[in-house]
Image (cartoon, rainbow, N blue to C red):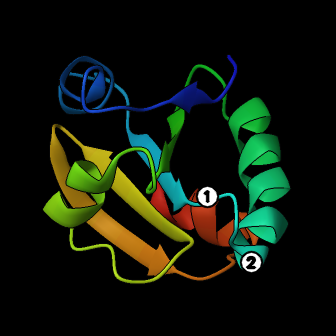
Amino acid sequence: MAVLTITKDNFQKEVLESAQPVLLDFWASWCGPCKMFSPIVDEFAEEREGEVKVGKVNIDEEPELANQFGIMSIPTALVFKNGQAVESAVGVQPKERLWDMTK
């Protein structure tokens, strides 16, 4: 499954109502570390297909979602389970950390 683009319009369905854990990457096009983190997130999404849903939230296009979850620095990875944010990590993370966060 490709990485989903998460917006305020599909957030409820794709994240809060998901039966699977969801990893969200909050990012922006002008953010250098975000560009370094993006291929790691993409690779993680391929490896965990069917187990974890992976989405990206562009904070410039979706400021309401960024504000709702108190995103102050990017990239920020946020994990949701059963509709609740359960774990977060700020900055570029190794893929192993993403595995640990979504167990």
Which residue lies at the image location 29% right of the left edge and 48% below the top edge? 80
Location of residue 17 with respect to 25 vertically, above or below: above
Q: Position of residue 90 (x, y in %)?
A: 50, 82
Q: Residues within 10 Å of mark 2 (few under 14, many from 20)?
A: some
Residue 73, image quadrant: bottom left
Q: Nearer the viewer, residue 102 or 69?
A: 69
Location of residue 19 with respect to 91 vertically, above or below: above
Q: Which residue is mark 1?
A: 99
Can residue 103 be seen here? The reply is: no
Q: Nearer the viewer, residue 75 or 79?
A: 75
Q: Please indicate whether residue 50 sits to the left or right of residue 90 in the image.
A: right
Q: Nearer the viewer, residue 103 or 28?
A: 28
Residue 70, image quadrant: bottom left
**Secondary structure of the residue carrying numbered label 1:** helix
Q: Position of residue 2 (x, y in %)?
A: 70, 21
Q: Amino acid at mark 2?
A: Pro
Q: Please indicate whether residue 20 sits to the left or right of residue 67 in the image.
A: right
Q: Quadrant of the N terminus?
A: top right
Q: Please indicate whether residue 54 sits to the left or right of residue 33 in the image.
A: left
Can residue 98 be seen here? The reply is: yes
Q: Which residue is mark 2?
A: 33
Task: Tell me whether the residue at label 1 lies in contact with that at label 2, contact meaning CB atoms closer than 8 angstroms.
Answer: no
